[in-house]
Image (cartoon, helix red, strand yellow):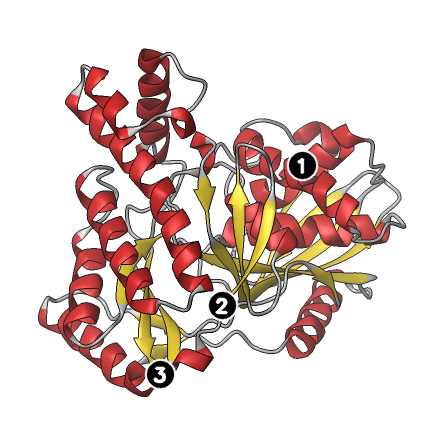
Amino acid sequence: MILLEPGTPAELSDSTRKAFQTTYGLESTVVGRSPGRVNLIGEHTDYNRGLCLPVALPHATYAAAALRTDGLFRMASRQADEPWQGTLADIGPGRPQGWAAYAAGVIWALADLGYHVPGLDLFIDSTVPVGAGLSSSAAIECSVAAAIVTLTGGELTADVRAALLPACMRAEIEVAGAPTGGMDQSVALFGQVGHALLLDFADGSRTQVPLALAEAGLSPLVIDTRVSHALIDGGYAARRADCERATAELGLESLREAALDDLGALTDQRVRRRARHVVTEIERVREVVAAATAQDWARVGRAFQASHVSLRDDYQVSCVELDLVVDTAMRHGAVGARMTGGGFGGSAISLVPTTELSAIAEAIEAAFSAADHAPPAFLVPEPSAGVSVE
């Protein structure tokens, strides 16, 4: 079984500092740390002004950084072969491309907010799986943002975190070209240990929701199918465009305002299915929050199952590997299982009895082998804290 360990913040911070020194021949000043995330429920609802319920992972990205005085930005990553360097004039919508877009885009967005960054050396390391639907991109953005704020004399107060949210979103949407909705950056900035974060994208509110999983003898098990997904390849944007079309046809500001009965007015069957997923998924978030608060985990599991069916059939963002994970987990005793993240590959999350965790993981691994799929990887994530500076 391939178990992806998060590593300890102290060890990874020290390792990233050493890599920075090896790369640039000088010591870093700070190390920003930002977690990945797994979404319990509420998929493709953020850009529809809906609700979602992510948790921050213990798996995180670390950004060691030091200021320069010559306007040059140099960036390298342990997870990427090619470094990048340039000036602020070289950063903007569509440039640079690849992994550097997420880091450089933050510099560009913060400069627009009035942060003066005279130059920067940066080295990034991460235990967040890339392409697994666990928000490796937002983890880069928020770790870099935390480092820059600290380097320029600021502190990660609640107000500063709130200001960093749109900057990190702009890096992803405008520079990297991924039209995401802000869930990933929100939980990276505001996650708390032992809690999920209920996000309301209509009023901007954030509510911490305690998760008493251990007391119920349950563990979250995340399964990375190793089917890499990207949010800039057109599928994500097409789903968002369908939602915008539905909103326009219904004469609403967002699908948050729609009821199921309204959707019969939509003339295109595909658009109607997309809208149906969003409307029902928002209700499932409410259901899971209420059930988790009441510690009714069977009810949570039923909502997980309904969410996966909706994502598979109405939103059509699942794949055979994700479906195999969900079906196998449920057959072997999971309380609930569903794909998580944007889809088109990536990961699934299941709630499993802690005593059966290894057996369920082994069953999924065996099912992948029998289907000639590459071996999946597994994470056992504890809900963790948001960004920090190590």
Mark 3, Cα crowd under 10 Å, few <14 / some 14-19 / many 20+, is some
> What's the distance in space between the residues labelled 2 and 3, CA to CA?
15 Å
Can you identify the residue that label 1 sits on? 167
> What's the distance in space between the residues labelled 3 and 1, CA to CA?
39 Å
What residue type is disc 2 on? Leu
User: Mark 2 vs mark 3: which is more N-terminal?
Assistant: 2
What residue type is disc 1 on? Ala
216 vs 100: above or below: below
Mark 1, Cα crowd under 10 Å, few <14 / some 14-19 / many 20+, is many
Mark 2, Cα crowd under 10 Å, few <14 / some 14-19 / many 20+, is some
Q: Residue at x 46, y 52 (%)?
A: 53
Say whether residue 299 is left or right of residue 86: left
Q: Position of residue 27 (x, y in %)?
A: 82, 66
Q: Residue at x 70, y 33 (%)?
A: 108
211 vs 108: above or below: below
Say whether residue 128 is left or right of residue 92: left
Q: Position of residue 146 (x, y in %)?
A: 73, 53
> What's the distance in space between the residues labelled 2 and 1, CA to CA?
29 Å
Residue 120 shows which numbered tag? Answer: none
Q: Nearer the viewer, mark 3 or mark 1?
A: 3
Q: 357 or 78, which is in the foreground? A: 357
User: Mark 3 vs mark 1: which is more N-terminal?
Assistant: 1
> Is residue 99 at all visible to an observer of this figure?
no
Q: The C terminus is located in which quarter?
A: bottom right
Can you identify the residue that label 2 sits on? 211
In the structure shown, which secondary structural element does the residue marked by tag 2 occupy?
A: loop
Say whether residue 289 is left or right of residue 60: left
In the structure shown, which secondary structural element does the residue marked by tag 3 occupy?
A: helix
Say whether residue 308 is left or right of residue 32: left
Residue 354 shows which numbered tag? Answer: 3
In the structure shown, which secondary structural element does the residue marked by tag 1 occupy?
A: helix
